[in-house]
Amino acid sequence: MKIAIISDIHGNLEALTSAFQVIQSRGITKIFCLGDIVGYGADPGACIDFLVNHHVRAVVGNHDRALFDRHVLMCFNRNAKHAIEWTQQHLTETQKEYLHSLPYVMTEGECTFVHASPLQPQEWDYLMSYRDASAAFPAFSTAICWIGHTHVPEIFAEDVTRETLERGKRFIVNVGSVGQPRDHDNRLSFCIFDTKDWNFEHIREPYDIAAAHKKIIDAGLPRWLGDRLANGS
Ligand code: ZN
């Protein structure tokens, strides 16, 4: 069965709907989201509703948690904090309850799903190197752990010699970000994985960045949050 794994939507409805055009054109109905549904972008509520309506199964990200946890919010820079305070005022109680209800970790079959790292998921550490990955492998028991958080797509193999997914080996895969890519490629990023034959695809797709940028400006959110969408950084 083919599944889609998306992450770091960050209130970018243009990117989310473009990702779904690809997902639906492939006939994929099982979708997992690795958190950070809100924060930065101008459509947090619409993105939550879209995921709920499409029966997406999600875990919580640090930006989602920051709405309820001051300790998480305190770690944010000025622009990110501003965006969370703005988001706080633009969500319904039902949408906030949805974010509050999301688990830190989910497991299904050979896959674990978590926002930042399977090692202490509530600490929101950035898993960016093989050193970080080797410390995280003992923290989950499935073959693959899907992560987001850094907004930079990457594959870490347990034996460090693999560059693509291969049955019998273990992997941590960062799917990149749908709503705010930071690897200097401004196209949205997510993954498709066939749980039966282990066929793996990393999808990069353009979307209407100008529209998402305009909404950020019109909402009175920091201009820098719009500019970085075009820069992909
Ligand atoms: Zn994020």
Image (cartoon, helix red, strand yellow):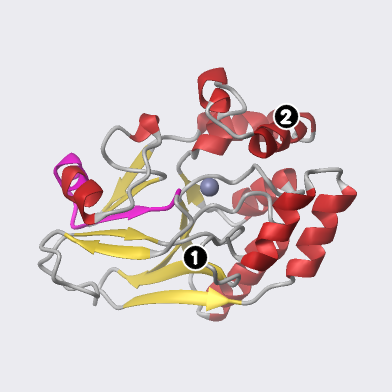
Instruction: Specify whether residue 143 is painted magenta.
Output: yes
Say above or below: 26 vs 82. Answer: below
Q: Residue furthest right?
A: 218
Instruction: Specify whether residue 142 is painted magenta.
Output: yes
Query: Which one is in front, 15 or 23?
Result: 15
Q: Is residue 1 visible?
A: no
Image position, residue 128 (x, y; %): 33, 52
Q: Is residue 177 visible?
A: yes
Residue 84 relative to residue 188: left or right: right
Image position, residue 141 (x, y; %): 16, 46
Say above or below: 122 vs 48. Answer: above
Residue 226 relative to residue 129: left or right: right
Query: Which one is in front, 133 or 115?
Result: 133
Query: Which one is in front, 9 or 226?
Result: 226
Q: Residue furthest top?
A: 70
Residue shown at the point (69%, 67%) measured from the top left: 230
Q: CA distance from mark 1 to mark 2?
A: 27 Å
Query: Which one is in front, 86 or 4?
Result: 86
SS category of the residue bearing label 2: helix
Residue shown at the point (45%, 42%) measured from the top left: 59
Q: To which residue does mark 1 refer?
A: 183
Q: To which residue does mark 2 refer?
A: 85
